Amino acid sequence: MKSIYKYVIAYLLFSVTSALAQNSLIIPDASGDTGDTISVSLQIDNSDSFVAFQTDILLPSQVNYLAGSAQVSSRAGDPALSAEIITGHTLRIVVYSASQSAFTGSSGEVLSFQLILNNDPGTYTLSLSNAFISAASSQNILTSAQNGAVTIYGPDISVSADSLDFDRTPLSQVTDRNINLSNPGNTSLNISRIYTDNPFFKIIGDTSLTLLAGNNISVLIRFNSQEKGVFDATLLLQSDDPDNPLVQVALSAVAFAVNELHTQNASGRSGHQVDISFNINNMEPFTGFQFDLVSDSVLNFIQDEVALSSRKTDHLVSANKTSENRLRVVAWS
């Protein structure tokens, strides 16, 4: 009976010890600025002795493994190391001891490698898969694997449009357009200069500014031409965005001269003569004009009763009916 009791006690102790044993493979979080080369650690916290480990690490597309940078820590005795990209962005790491020498210690770094960060700010997962911690008996004693993350710090400029159309604008008048600038990065964005390559397109407001991470601002661009024509220009934004330091936005506009013919209101008594005046508001010189006046049947044109104002020089004018209710007026020099 005592032997059975001792066996039960021993079995329970073994079960509790096994349940409490933790052998974890861990990637601690790492970070750096855009364009940096950073060191990433691989740690093992172990309750049991081990002589080898292996894992695949799925790297995000925003980082690249620096070939040949993997190094085993001082916890290893006589390690053999293999670290290489096997497919796409999967880094496979294999470390073992040919003499079955156990790693020292029960926690801490067992290997480090370097990653080259690209210019896309954000936090990205380093995923472990096919992980294996081997005892001397070749048994996999891994109990858990903990993914890590790499954070890339940097600004990032974003604009709401790649072109702005100012449509048609009369000479000496203005047309305004707004463009939204934002910083989806995780550090401040410094915009050192906002300008255009055409003096008819002007920035209204600050031409340099700082946008905190996650913030945005609207920039006002004004078109005001003193010349008629079709205009194409470029809005340029210089900043410390590492992969897009100069953003260009296409600008287009049409400026036209205003030359208007206006009929003035007139009134009078039935059966009496009424004078009707016509005005021309012009931004450009002109040598003649023509128009048709369509009137109601109650109005009758008095022949030869048409005259030019003092704005004429050597101009002549004629007015003739082309149909019952249509009068054609032509002036020329």
Image (cartoon, rainbow, N blue to C red):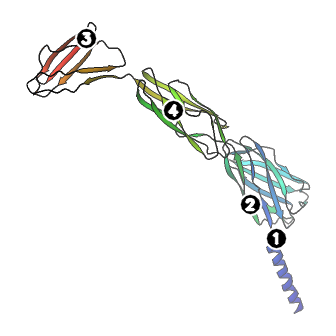
| Pointers 1 and 4 in contact (C-beta within 8 Å) | no
Tag count: 4
* Residue that badge 1 annotates: 21
Q: Earlier in the sequence, mark 1 or mark 4?
A: 1
* Residue that badge 4 annotates: 221
Q: Residue at image x 21%, y 12%? A: 317
Residue 226 appears left or right of 295? right
Distance (Cα) linking label 2 and label 3:
90 Å
Q: Earlier in the sequence, mark 2 or mark 3?
A: 2
SS for tag 1?
loop
| Pointers 1 and 3 in contact (C-beta within 8 Å) | no
Vertical relation: 119 (above or below) 193? below
Vertical relation: 113 (above or below) 174? below
Quadrant in which the N terminus is drawn: bottom right
Q: Earlier in the sequence, mark 2 or mark 1?
A: 1
SS for tag 4?
strand
Numbered circle sitting on residue 236: none
Distance (Cα) linking label 4 and label 2:
51 Å
* Residue that badge 3 annotates: 332
Examine the rendering and report whether any part of residue 321 can be seen.
Answer: yes
Numbered circle sitting on residue 146: 2
Distance (Cα) linking label 4 and label 3:
42 Å
